[in-house]
Image (tube, rainbow, N blue to C red):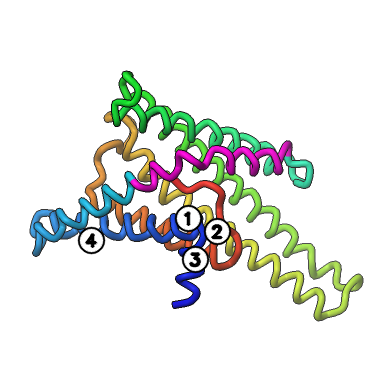
Amino acid sequence: MESVANVLETYRGRDRLVRTVCYSSRLLGGLLVAPGGSRPELGRRLLLIARELSNCRAALRLFDDLSMYLYSREYGLGGTEEDTIVRLLSITENLADQLYYPCEHVAWAADYRILSINSDKWWTLSNSLWSLSLALGALRSFRVVQLLRKELKRSPNKTYLKTEESNRMSRRTYRTRMRVEILNIISCLADLTNAIHWMPPGFLWAGKFPEWLVGLMGTLSSVIGLYQMSCGSCSTKDP
């Protein structure tokens, strides 16, 4: 109880839990309203909850620009990264994230008639930036896993420089980092499938996912996000 309460005290922790409830409601609701579903009325109510929670998260993201900017500024040109590919992928990902938020804000304002413009193209643009960010995030984690595997293969040859215990600790650290990056790949790809589903019709599988499958992919990435947060590796963006 205390750990859940502590998570809810933080904005990022509350957003993670709301995201998980949102997508799990979409998963269960989609299953119940699907052909052959046992309780379609309950399913519609769960889908309504999911839609309202999604709208709530979109409104709260109106205030995420500054935190994203501070994160991007702190990372800068990735001077602490030893690998050039990881650095370039991270810089491009940060740029896509930074552009994502204002585009989504404009689309949100257009939906609520605050701006007298068509929101469709702005939603498409923000969704494209989100898709790009997810793809770059998956590629970055894949590259990091490759580098960690190389280090693991090299580490036995360095035992003469370390004690047996320190070498074992080093290998455990590498494996932990690999597990985190692999989970990040799964999370990014799960969200990317949904992002493509929300693209304009005619693009790959856009518009072809049933509600329960959108909920399943979102729930998978959300649960991974909660696990990463508990491990202290919380991501900075989470549409």
- Find the distance from the CA under tag 2 to the CA under tag 1: 6 Å
Chief secondary structure of the magenta span?
helix
Which numbered mark, 2 or 3, is in the foreground of this view?
Answer: 3
Distance of label 4 from label 1 (alpha carbons): 21 Å
Question: Is residue 61 within the magenta segment?
Answer: yes
Residue sitting at 68 percent across and 43 percent down?
86
Q: For the residues marked 2 and 3, what is the alpha-carbon distance in whole angstroms? A: 24 Å
Name the one closer to the observer, 4 or 219: 4
Q: Where residue 49 sits: x, y (%)?
A: 24, 54
Residue type at mark 4 is: Leu
Above or below, comparing residue 114 to residue 195 in the picture: above
In this view, which residue lies farthest toward the right?
161
Q: How many circles with numbers are drawn on the protein?
A: 4
- Which residue has dot 2 on it? 182
Q: Which residues are magenta?
A: 56-77
Q: Amino acid at mark 2?
A: Ile
Which is closer to the viewer, label 4 or label 1?
Answer: 4
> Which disc is residue 28 wearing?
4
Q: Which residue is mark 3?
A: 7
